[in-house]
Image: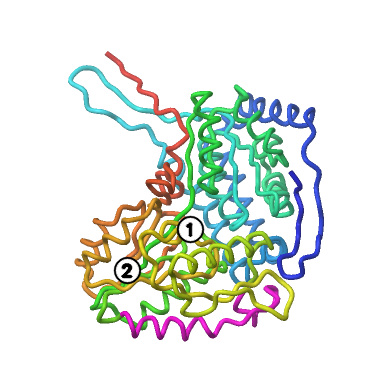
């Protein structure tokens, strides 16, 4: 597996890194296991807190450098890269501040004697992480588990190796002992080897359905717990009493943030008939204002996709949708006449239930538009998907919004906004979007031993 930084704007190779050698992999596994047994798991919350607090502080000090690495490697607009760095530092701080409270012993009522449940770390954890949010995805895996006393090993995406190294260096510079946080430039075969290793106690993956199925199968054979955060095709429901201006504002940010390359991006826009024409007109007008350019230039509003392969795949999906009866309302092509992996902001309409696009995830600036008769029809389309990650409901009647939200079969629903992520909000889905939760108090409970202690 080639670990390479290829600038999505210029197409030029910046740096490449060799896969880890077998003897080095064994050395790092041994170090991580030793660190867990003899050092990190033995430290108290205050000692772990000091390391994560220092890491958060260093991340803010290095914000510009770390943000530029994101933009260089996967093409994110520089302002959004800076936002990712800030959010990642906030996650480190959040768990440093709250882990001891979240893992405090729980006293149980029992007729005789006393009983309590205590939380203890389980060992070395392995995380397989994606390219689209190179620090945020890692922070939400590493921060809670390090604070719980586990140690973590991370196989990052092959297209963001400099981001992977920058985060590892951050933890070392913050005072984490060698082996507490380990980056691995591992091959696919080595990933399977790591999962099978008895020193690895659990696995977390954020990525595609296919990758999730492979990793879960490997872990399942070893009876190891997994959490999976996979794809999404989030519905964005606009009811007839919605605030149109607010809905359009959030539709744009929900679809176009990170150039649409987010599992929780708003992807399926489901609008009730009385507002459908006006919404589509305003939505297309706003999409038409995006201007491609160098993502390091703050004047640029349309960033390139992460790779040439990502752009080709998205174009194939659009072509396939049209071949099965969908109509291109705007866009539909690559941006010509300039460097970079740019896709025109695109809107597809007339998507029937037997169109492959109806059930696919479009990872880029392509919006699927559906007009429906009423609320019930909107909910039906929202739930008619293999995915169940997030969704949005727009209405000025908040109680109505809550009722609709409860009927949507996803892990998260946002009323009058697109999906947002914050350290205190649980993140995760159902159906083909995976299982388990990250962030909030839930994120630190996934990989600890909830041990009952009963005194008779």
The correct choice, above or below, for 154 with respect to 170 in the image is above
Q: Is residue 242 visible?
A: yes
Q: Which residue lies at the image location 50% right of the left edge and 69% below the top edge? A: 366
Within-10-Å neighbours for mark 2: few <14, some 14–19, many 20+: many
Q: Position of residue 202 (x, y in %)?
A: 53, 31
Task: Give the label on residue 397, or none.
Answer: none
Callout in the foreground (1, 2): 1
Question: Which residue in the structure is indicated by mark 1?
Answer: 361
- Closer-to-camera residue (98/382): 382
Height in image: 439 above or below 391? above
Q: Is residue 286 magenta?
A: yes
Q: Is residue 338 left or right of residue 400?
A: right
Image point (50%, 62%), residue name: 362
Q: Residue furthest left?
A: 111
Circle number at residue 237: 2
Q: Quadrant of the C terminus?
A: top left
Q: CA distance from mark 1 to mark 2?
A: 17 Å
Determine the image quadrant of residue 246: bottom left
Query: Circle 1 — which element?
Result: loop
Left or right: 267 as drawn, with respect to 202 = left
Q: Position of residue 229 (x, y in %)?
A: 48, 47
Q: Residue furthest top?
A: 456
Q: Residue at x 82, y 56 (%)?
A: 15
Would residue 61 be visible to someone looking at this image? no
Residue 305 lies, in percent from the top left, at 63, 66
What range is drawn magenta here? 276-302
Q: Is residue 303 above or below residue 201?
A: below
Q: How many marks?
A: 2
Q: Is residue 136 magenta?
A: no
Residue at the spot x=37%, y=32% of the render? Answer: 105
In what element is the residue under mark 2?
strand
- In the image shown, does 71 or 8 lie closer to the viewer? 8
């Amino acid at each position: 597996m080639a670990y390479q930084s290829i600038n999505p704007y210029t197409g030029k190779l910046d740096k490449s890194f060799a896969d880890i050698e077998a003897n080095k992999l064994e050395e790092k596994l041994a170090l991580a296991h030793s660190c867990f047994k003899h050092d990190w798991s033995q430290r108290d919350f205050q000692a772990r807190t000091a390391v994560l607090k220092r890491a958060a502080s260093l991340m803010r000090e290095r914000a510009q450098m770390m943000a530029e690495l994101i933009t260089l490697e996967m093409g994110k607009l520089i302002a959004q890269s800076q936002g990712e760095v800030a959010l990642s530092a906030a996650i480190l701080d959040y768990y440093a501040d709250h882990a001891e409270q979240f893992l405090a012993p729980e006293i149980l009522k029992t007729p005789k004697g006393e009983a309590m449940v205590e939380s203890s770390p389980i060992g070395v954890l392995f995380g397989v992480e994606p390219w689209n949010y190179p620090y945020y995805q890692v922070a939400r895996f590493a921060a809670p588990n390090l604070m719980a006393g586990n140690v973590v090993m991370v196989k990052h995406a092959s297209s963001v190796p400099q981001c992977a190294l920058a985060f590892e260096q951050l933890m070392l510079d913050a005072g984490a002992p060698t082996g507490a946080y380990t980056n691995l430039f591992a091959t696919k075969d080595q990933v399977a080897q790591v999962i099978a290793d008895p020193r690895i106690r659990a696995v977390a993956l954020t990525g595609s359905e296919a990758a999730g199925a492979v990793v879960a199968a490997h872990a399942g054979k070893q009876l190891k717990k997994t959490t999976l955060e996979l794809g999404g095709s989030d519905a964005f429901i606009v009811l007839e009493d919605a605030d149109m201006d607010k809905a359009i504002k959030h539709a744009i940010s929900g679809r176009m943030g990170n150039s649409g390359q987010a599992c929780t991006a708003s992807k399926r826009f489901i609008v009730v008939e009385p507002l459908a024409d006006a919404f589509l007109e305003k939505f297309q007008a706003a999409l038409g204002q995006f201007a491609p350019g160098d993502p390091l230039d703050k004047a640029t509003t349309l960033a390139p996709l992460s790779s040439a392969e990502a752009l080709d795949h998205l174009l194939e999906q659009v072509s396939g949708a049209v071949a099965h009866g969908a109509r291109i309302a705007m866009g539909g092509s690559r941006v010509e006449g300039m460097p970079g992996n740019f896709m025109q902001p695109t809107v597809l309409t007339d998507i029937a239930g037997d169109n492959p696009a109806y059930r696919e995830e479009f990872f880029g600036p392509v919006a699927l538009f559906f007009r429906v008769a009423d609320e019930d029809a909107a909910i039906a389309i929202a739930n008619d998907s293999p995915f169940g990650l997030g969704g949005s409901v727009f209405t000025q009647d908040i109680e109505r919004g809550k009722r609709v939200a409860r009927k949507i079969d996803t892990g998260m629903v946002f009323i009058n906004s697109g999906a947002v992520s914050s350290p205190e909000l649980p993140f995760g889905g159902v159906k083909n979007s995976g299982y388990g939760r990250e962030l909030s108090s839930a994120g630190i409970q996934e990989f600890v031993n909830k041990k009952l202690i009963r005194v008779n």
